[in-house]
Image (tube, helix red, strand yellow):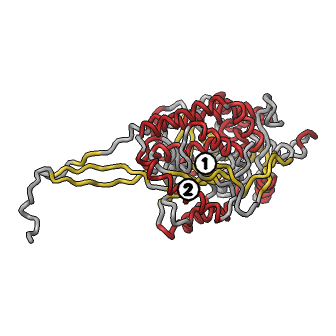
């Protein structure tokens, strides 16, 4: 199990010798003491990336792609180890880590490995006598900060397009969930990635993350996390006006109309909020029900929520594991008190499970709360747990007003049998992604990102490659003559 920093192709201790224990959220026992990067370590990592950049950007795009494709194969070959590391460190149920997290990670590296030599420039039609073409060039050294909720998958979302485009990377995983990312560094060595192209510096966000955002040698910072931290990233980046890409919080509206297939909507809505214990920025955390079907829907939904098997994430039968840290568990439970204080009704859950085998862990029962008002805190603020807020609406106009009535705009979903309504609302919902009769679908080829307080920029697809490149405009005088309007000496 790797527990050191990865700088310039070697696993090394932090310059200060400082470490931080990473805990198993099932019982809060120590898994490993992980090196914590400080400013000196970030300087070393950035310097290594700067040294590696000229050769990496000049490498044939197809050769860069082959390294990423080999890495994807290695990830698949190490599925069991990666899945167990991810479940041990984060609390993801092993069944999800095996069939979702690891395959999605491999798929992302494979997608961008294939795209590396297919990302083309353009020719601009300009005045006669001149050729104007555009080059897409890598920005340079990229700083990346990934969150603790999907550390393995987000490592690929961040790194794969940056590397395919020819950039070098200094990546900071969350200090509480670094283990799967460090394993990826080991696999990158096996895939033949040159030293210094990727550097991984676990550390505190307030130290290593802040300095990475400030660092004058970093040309771009890409961050996934809370909106509050995203604002600090923007401020820290101002020193050298680096590019900034932010994927921040969400308060996803999941709208169920009275003509929806209720069985599909109930199952899909449970997936939308309870997958990964609700620790997802795109979670369908506002369950909006048409008043005609609200009672029947809730009866089915609550029965499903009560049936979810909580337990040790390494148990293949577990359907919902612990939250990733005790601090976050306490934050989620505090919102139950907020709901009651504001007149909300707890319909199910709202407490740790009674099972004595789970008492040492960070568990919270699937929680369903009916809000008194769409302006209540539980209907406006991101809880980031297995906590869904129920609201009702009477018609399409009211549904749209409530759905768009937050500062966030990451993902939204709707369930309906009316095709015209589906397309109409997809255009009107203020969100970067809309799912129709589904929820939380992602694919390496489909742009992922939000609007408003959910950030800007996009992961995945050709949009991600554009995020990690900059345009150079080249003009050629193809007539080889001096135009008459040029000044003469």
Relative height, residue 13 to residue 277 (above, below): below
Secondary structure of the residue carrying numbered label 1 = loop
Quarter of the figure with residue 365: top right
Q: Residue furthest left?
A: 484
Instruction: Residue at the far right: name it.
Output: 356
Q: Position of residue 37 (x, y in %)?
A: 68, 59
x, y percent for residue 129: 12, 51
The residue indicated by pointer 2 is: 48
As drawn, the label of residue 69 is: none
Image quarter (top left, top right, bottom left or bottom right) of the N terminus:
top right
Q: Where's the C terminus, which quadrant?
A: bottom left
Pointer 2 local density, CA inside 10 Å: few below 14, some 14–19, many at least 20: many
Element type where label 2 sits in the image? helix
Residue shown at 60% from the left, 45% from the top = 155
| Residue pictured at 58% horizontal, 30% vertical | 73
Q: Name the residue that disc number 1 marks.
A: 9
């Amino acid at each position: 199990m790797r527990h050191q920093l990865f700088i310039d192709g070697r696993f090394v201790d932090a310059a200060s010798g400082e470490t931080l224990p990473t805990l198993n959220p099932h019982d809060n026992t120590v898994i490993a003491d992980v090196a914590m990067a400080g400013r000196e370590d970030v300087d070393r990592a950035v310097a290594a990336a700067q040294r590696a950049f000229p050769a990496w950007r000049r490498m044939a795009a197809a050769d860069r792609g082959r390294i990423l494709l080999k890495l994807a194969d290695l990830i698949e070959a190490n599925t069991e180890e990666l899945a167990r590391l991810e479940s041990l460190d984060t609390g993801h149920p092993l069944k999800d880590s095996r069939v979702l997290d690891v395959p999605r990670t491999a798929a992302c590296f494979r997608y961008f490995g294939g795209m590396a030599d297919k990302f083309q420039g353009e020719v601009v039609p300009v005045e006669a006598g001149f050729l104007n073409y555009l080059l897409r060039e890598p920005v340079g050294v990229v700083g990346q900060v990934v969150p603790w909720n999907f550390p393995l998958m987000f490592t690929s979302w961040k790194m794969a397009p940056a590397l395919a485009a020819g950039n070098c990377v200094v990546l900071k995983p969350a200090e509480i969930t670094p283990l799967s990312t460090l394993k990826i560094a080991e696999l990158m060595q096996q895939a033949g990635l040159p030293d210094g192209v990727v550097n991984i510096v676990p550390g505190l966000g307030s130290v290593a993350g802040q300095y990475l955002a400030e660092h004058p040698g970093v040309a771009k910072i890409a961050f996934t996390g809370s909106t509050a931290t995203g604002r600090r990233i923007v401020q820290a980046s101002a020193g050298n006006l680096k590019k900034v890409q932010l994927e921040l919080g969400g308060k996803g509206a999941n709208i169920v109309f009275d003509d929806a297939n209720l069985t599909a909507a109930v199952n899909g809505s449970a997936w939308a909020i309870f997958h990964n214990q609700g620790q997802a920025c795109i979670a369908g955390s506002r369950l909006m029900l048409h008043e005609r079907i609200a009672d029947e829907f809730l009866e089915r939904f609550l029965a499903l929520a009560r049936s979810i098997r909580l337990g040790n994430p390494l148990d293949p039968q577990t359907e919902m594991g612990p939250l990733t840290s005790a601090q976050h568990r306490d934050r989620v439970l505090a919102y139950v008190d907020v709901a009651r204080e504001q007149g909300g009704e707890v319909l199910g859950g709202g407490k740790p499970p009674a099972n004595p085998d789970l008492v040492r862990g960070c568990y919270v029962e699937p929680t369903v709360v009916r809000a008194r008002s769409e302006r209540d805190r539980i209907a406006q603020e991101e809880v980031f747990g297995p906590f869904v807020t129920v609201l009702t609406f009477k018609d399409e106009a009211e549904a749209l007003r409530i759905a768009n009535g937050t500062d966030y705009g990451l993902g939204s979903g709707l369930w309906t049998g009316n095709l015209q309504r589906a397309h109409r609302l997809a255009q009107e919902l203020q969100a970067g992604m809309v799912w129709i009769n589904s929820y939380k679908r992602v694919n390496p080829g489909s742009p992922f990102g939000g609007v408003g307080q959910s950030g800007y920029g996009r992961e995945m697809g050709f949009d991600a490659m554009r995020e990690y490149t900059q345009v150079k405009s080249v003009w050629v005088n193809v007539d080889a003559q001096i135009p008459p309007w040029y000044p003469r000496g």
